[in-house]
Structures are given as structure tokens and as C-alpha cells.
């Protein structure tokens, strides 16, 4: 019997070699059969697979029949994200709840509707009796996204109507999950810190009079204290991450899984699995790690040449994780600018000043300016490169003293609003199970009875 379930045994290594031998598709075949790898065309533009009214990602405009790159724009239900953020700032209020209402119901709420909606979310901002003790505290994971996924799937068992996919029931489940995500994430982190790091266990109780952003800081910090600017920056981060078109990986996953007719908990858990990936929601963690390495490697943060050298080494796979990437730079759609990064930048600058960390912000600003130049010199790129929202969000979370383990869960706390809106849209307008085509290129084989099968390697060894 295997004693260590995490051990890579010789048998597994041998079978791994077999996988490598028999999973080998010639890249030229993708061109031959005109396969849109990653559901993108040759220019990197996403293949049109559906229609949505929830949000629009815009990166160019048509001029004389040609697409001309412009500053990126993001629209939620037809409203420019810039206007939504500005409206909240001008009114000196938090806006994530209003954003969630807009995404789910397709219109901006009145003052009365918003107040009632905030009260509804506050009422749902709790967990079933003993859930923290029986689920979150048992076998705490070192990865908070896995903790979050497990908690979501377990909530299925606490729901009296988990498989009912009527509009009313799915909306009820969606609102509960939106309200519960901060608790599941933060409580999971506290359990991890207690059992894996010997920290004191602290389980804070949410305040029904606080916004989502305020409650996150309130239950995360043992003293429950935070500044107005801290809560405002986190609220803006939640607004900016709440939705980003139907084609991003986790939202498309939500559509695909929802189209099968499965339950809400399974659909959201699938989206969480997608978001965890470093090519998607986990990118802000990579940015944070990259800058930590950069700060140690560069002696003078004001020396542009030294910064260029480090960025060049990143692209040449000589620095940091040797992936050849500058994390936080570039986007699948945006070229000239990412509107979320553009909006978030000024609030991160203000927060860095409040925290006396302006020097670090200036380093980010220099990399933001120099990285596109270095990438342009060393890479053949088909469109412009600019900082994306992950470039600044990781630094913002560090300024807020938020633990690295919660960076991606905070993304999920925000994006679940968009996921739920898209799940409702798929249920109401989809109609068919999503099933793209894959072309088989494996030739037909002649079946050989087990008694006559020989291992070519063993046979060649015997002859030798």
C-alpha cells in the first residue's frame, strides 16, 4: 500500500514518459486545418462564440474599414466603467454593491433599490450553522482558491434545493454566494494561518452596516480597523474586477458548464478552478513576486538603464522565474491601455503616499513606461503592449497589507458578480449545450489481442 500519497514513484515516472511519447501534435497541423488555437484567430482576436448584454471590452474603432487601436474601454451593461467609478467617488460612497446590481439586473438602481439590495446582501452575509467548524476548519489548504472551491461545493449539501435551476432559485443562490465569498475566503485564510503557521485563530463577525470592501478589512484584521482610503481602494478594485466580457477564461467556463444544465455550485466551482491559474486570476501574485525579485536585484530604483537590463533579462529567461514574461504587461484584447489599470493607477498612487511607499510606486511607474519599449525591441508583436490591471492590483493589495494567499480569492470575491450574471444569461438565452469541435488526427489502429502485444522497447533490448 502506498504510504505517501504525494510521492512521484518510479511507476508514475515511467507512465509520464509514455504520456510524452503519445501526446505529440505537430504545431504545423494547426495551420493546415485552420484551427483557432485558444479560440483566437491569427491576430490573437477571440473567435465569436456567443452574444452577451452584460459587458463589452473595447480596444479599437473602425476607420475606413480598418480597425485602429485606441485607449481601451470597458462597459458594464452599456455604462463606461470610468463613469461608474467616478460616480461613486463624487458621491463619496462605495460602489461594488451598485455594480453587482447593475450586472445582475441590467440597470442602475435607484437610491431605494440600492438600499434594499444592500440589506438583502447583508442578510445573506453569513454561513450555515457550524459550517466554519465542520468545513473550513477541517483539513485547511495552503491554497485559498482550493479552500474556496471546496467550501462552495460543500454548500451544495446545505441547500434544500441545490439542483433547481429555475431563475428564482439560481438568483437566490447567486446572491448568497456573492455575500458569502468574503467570509469563505477570509475564514479559510485564518484557518490556514492557525493550523499551518501557528498563528492565533481569529474569526471576525461581519457588520451588516458595512460595505463588502469594508467588511473584508473588518473581518480580516484582528483589530477590525482600516482607513477610508484603504476601503475605497479595495472597493474600486472590486468594481474593476467584477466583469470583463464573456470571453475571459473563467466566465467562458461559467457559460460552458452552465449550458450543461448543472447546479450553481458546480458552475461557480469550475469558474474558480479557471481563475486560480497564473495565466488568469493568479497573474497578480506573479506580478508581486516579480517585483519582490526586482527590488532585490536592482541596486538603484531610479536608474532607467538598470531597470531596462532587468526587464531584458526577464524576456531572455535570465531573471525571476525564467519564463520569458514580464508579468502585468500586455493583454489579450487591450493594446494602447487597459482602462482598469488607467483608473486604478491614480488611487494606488494616493495609497502609496499615505503608506509612505512612494518610492516603490515610482518603480512601478518606471517599469510601466520602460517595459513596452523593451518588449518592442526584443519581440515581434502584432499590437501594442501596456500595463494591465494585474500590474497595479498586486501592489495595491500589498499596500493594504493583504496576505499574498488572498490576492486571487479577492479577484473571485469581485468576479463572482459577473459569473452569476453570465450564468443567468446562459440559462435565459443559451438554449444549447456548448460543444466546440476538435479534429482528430490520430490514424486508425488495428486491434491486437493482449496475448500478442509486445513492448517495442523490450523487444529491441532482447535483440541487442
Image: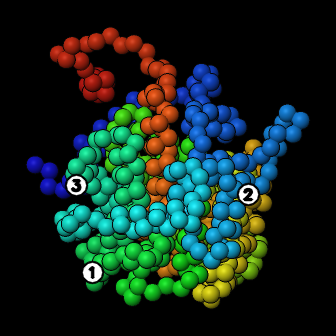
Q: Earlier in the sequence, mark 1 or mark 2?
A: 1
Q: Closer to the N terminus: mark 2 or mark 3? A: 3
Please tell me which residue lies in front, 421 or 353: 421
Residue topped by disc 1:
201
Mark identifier at residue 26: none
Residue at image position (77%, 74%) is: 304
Are the residues flagged by discs 1 and 2 in contact, CB closer than 8 Å? no
Give the SS element for disc 2: loop
Residue 129 seen in the figure = yes
**Distance from Cα at disc 1 to Cα at disc 2:** 43 Å
Quarter location, residue 95: bottom right
Q: In the rendered image, which residue does mark 3 sit on?
A: 158
Closer-to-camera residue (418/359) = 418
Distance between the alpha carbons at the discs numbered 3 and 1: 25 Å
Left or right of 358, for residue 221: left
Q: Which residue is mark 2?
A: 337
- Indicate whether 347 appears above or below 342: below
Q: Are marks 2 and 3 in contact (CB under 8 Å)?
A: no
At x 28%, y 65%, the residue is 127
Q: Farthest residue toward the left?
A: 1
Amino acid at each position: 500500500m502506498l504510504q505517501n500519497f504525494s510521492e512521484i514513484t518510479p511507476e508514475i515516472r515511467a507512465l509520464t514518459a509514455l504520456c510524452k511519447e503519445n501526446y505529440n501534435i505537430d504545431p504545423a497541423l494547426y495551420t493546415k486545418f485552420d484551427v483557432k488555437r485558444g479560440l483566437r484567430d491569427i491576430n490573437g482576436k477571440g473567435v465569436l462564440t456567443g452574444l452577451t448584454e452584460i459587458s463589452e471590452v473595447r480596444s479599437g474603432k473602425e476607420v475606413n474599414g480598418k480597425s485602429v487601436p485606441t485607449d481601451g474601454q470597458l462597459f458594464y451593461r452599456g455604462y463606461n466603467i470610468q463613469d461608474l467609478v467616478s460616480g461613486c467617488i463624487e458621491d463619496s460612497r462605495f460602489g461594488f454593491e451598485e455594480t453587482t446590481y447593475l450586472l445582475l439586473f441590467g440597470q442602475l438602481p435607484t437610491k431605494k433599490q440600492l438600499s434594499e439590495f444592500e440589506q438583502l446582501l447583508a442578510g445573506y452575509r453569513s454561513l450555515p450553522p457550524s459550517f466554519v467548524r465542520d468545513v473550513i476548519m477541517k483539513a485547511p489548504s495552503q491554497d485559498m482558491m482550493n479552500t474556496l472551491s471546496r467550501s462552495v461545493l460543500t454548500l451544495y449539501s446545505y441547500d434544500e434545493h441545490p439542483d433547481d435551476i429555475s431563475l428564482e432559485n439560481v438568483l437566490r443562490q447567486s446572491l448568497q454566494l456573492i455575500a458569502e465569498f468574503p467570509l469563505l475566503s477570509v475564514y479559510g485564510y485564518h484557518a490556514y494561518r492557525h493550523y499551518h503557521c501557528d498563528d492565533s485563530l481569529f474569526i471576525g463577525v461581519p457588520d451588516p452596516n458595512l460595505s463588502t470592501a469594508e467588511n473584508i478589512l473588518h473581518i480580516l484584521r484582528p483589530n477590525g480597523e482600516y482607513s477610508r482610503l484603504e476601503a475605497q481602494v479595495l472597493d474600486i478594485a472590486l468594481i474593476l474586477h467584477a466583469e470583463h466580457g464573456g470571453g475571459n477564461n473563467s466566465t467562458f467556463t461559467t457559460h460552458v458548464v452552465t449550458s450543461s444544465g448543472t447546479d450553481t455550485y458546480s458552475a461557480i466551482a469550475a469558474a474558480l478552478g479557471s481563475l486560480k491559474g497564473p495565466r488568469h486570476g493568479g497573474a497578480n501574485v506573479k506580478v508581486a513576486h516579480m517585483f519582490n525579485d526586482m527590488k532585490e536585484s536592482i541596486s538603484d530604483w531610479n536608474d532607467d538603464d538598470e531597470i531596462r537590463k532587468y526587464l531584458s533579462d526577464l524576456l531572455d529567461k535570465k531573471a525571476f522565474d525564467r519564463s520569458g514574461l514580464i508579468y502585468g504587461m500586455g493583454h489579450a484584447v487591450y493594446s494602447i491601455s487597459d482602462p482598469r489599470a488607467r483608473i486604478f493607477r491614480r488611487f494606488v498612487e494616493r495609497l502609496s503616499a499615505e503608506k509612505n511607499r512612494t518610492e516603490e510606486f515610482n518603480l512601478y511607474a518606471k517599469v510601466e513606461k520602460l517595459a513596452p519599449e523593451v518588449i518592442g525591441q526584443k519581440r515581434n508583436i502584432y499590437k501594442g503592449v501596456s500595463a494591465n490591471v494585474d500590474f497595479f492590483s498586486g501592489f495595491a493589495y500589498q499596500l493594504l497589507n493583504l496576505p499574498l494567499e488572498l490576492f486571487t480569492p479577492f479577484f473571485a470575491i469581485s468576479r463572482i458578480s459577473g459569473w452569476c450574471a453570465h450564468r443567468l444569461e446562459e440559462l435565459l438565452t443559451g438554449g444549447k449545450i456548448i460543444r466546440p469541435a476538435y479534429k482528430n488526427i490520430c490514424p486508425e489502429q488495428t486491434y491486437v489481442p493482449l496475448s500478442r502485444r509486445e513492448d517495442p522497447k523490450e523487444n529491441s533490448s532482447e535483440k541487442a
